[in-house]
Image (spheres, rainbow, N blue to C red):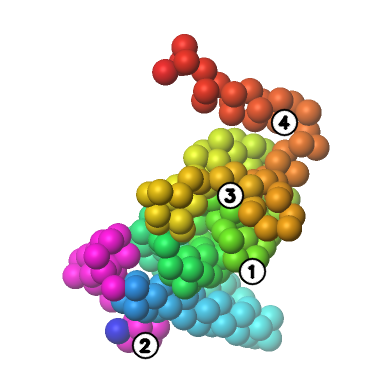
Amino acid sequence: LGFSFIQHPILMFEVEVKNLYNNILSDKSSSVNLKIQVLKNLQTYLQEEDTRMQQADRDWKKVSKQEDLKEMGDISSGMSSSIMQLYLKQVLESFFHKQSSVRHFALNVIALTLNQGLIHPVQCVPYLVAMGTDPEPSMRNKADQQLVEIDKKYTGFIHMKAVAGIKMSYLVQQAIISDAKRIVRGFRQDESNSALCSHLYSMIRGNRQHRRAFLISLLNLFDDAAV
């Protein structure tokens, strides 16, 4: 299916395909291999589209009919954006899976989607904050880098979604531990003993107003009067 969708991406709008992909990603009983295959298919499609767009850009610079080629690029980009909107929620929810391979491919898909500008990044911020707590350095570094890029382009977005990100971080850690007897800890149990959300705080602390608002929001979560 994956190769067919690369050649004919419009097929991914079909109801049967949409239901198949989303059900595999959202159903907890689906096999890990199936989840990974769906995520790989989406990743390969985005990579191929990126290659096509780069080639179209090179062609656009060579020929005189610039408007026509630009329009072709806009149409291709628009289709990619629409496709990712169909599957975005289920891909993001794949971050809450105990298997690191599932989280790995889900993060790859989101990184490609953001790098190509196919979706508004604000909806991904809490999930990226959560993935920044992943025990695997390669994944948390990739998530942290995406946050840095978003912060460069959209100042204040990280602050706006920081508390939501903290809450999602707890869910990610719950999924990773997958042991009801173990307690979720907010620090890395290694030689560093650093806070799991240390990178998030390092991005916020430079702005006094944002830092203060973030800490007050965290404290309010433990306010009995607010419950």
Residue where numbered disc 2 is placed = 3
Q: Under tag 1, what secondary structure?
A: helix
| Label 3 vs 2, first from the N-terminus | 2
Residue 211, disc: 4
The location of residue 192, given as percent across then percent down, is 74, 55
**CB contact under 8 Å: marks 3 and 2:** no
Residue where numbered disc 1 is placed = 138
Picture quadrant where residue 207 is located:
top right
| Amino acid type indicated by mark 1 | Ser
Which residue is nearer to you in this view: 73 or 40? 40
Q: Nearer the viewer, mark 1 or mark 4?
A: 1
Q: In whole angstroms, how far apart are the C-alphas of marks 1 and 4? A: 27 Å
| Amino acid type indicated by mark 2 | Phe
Residue 129, disc: 3
| Label 1 vs 4, first from the N-terminus | 1
Number of residues whose C-alpha sits closer than 10 Å to that of mark 1, classed few (under 14), some (14–19) or many (20 or more): few
The location of residue 139, given as percent across then percent down, is 60, 65
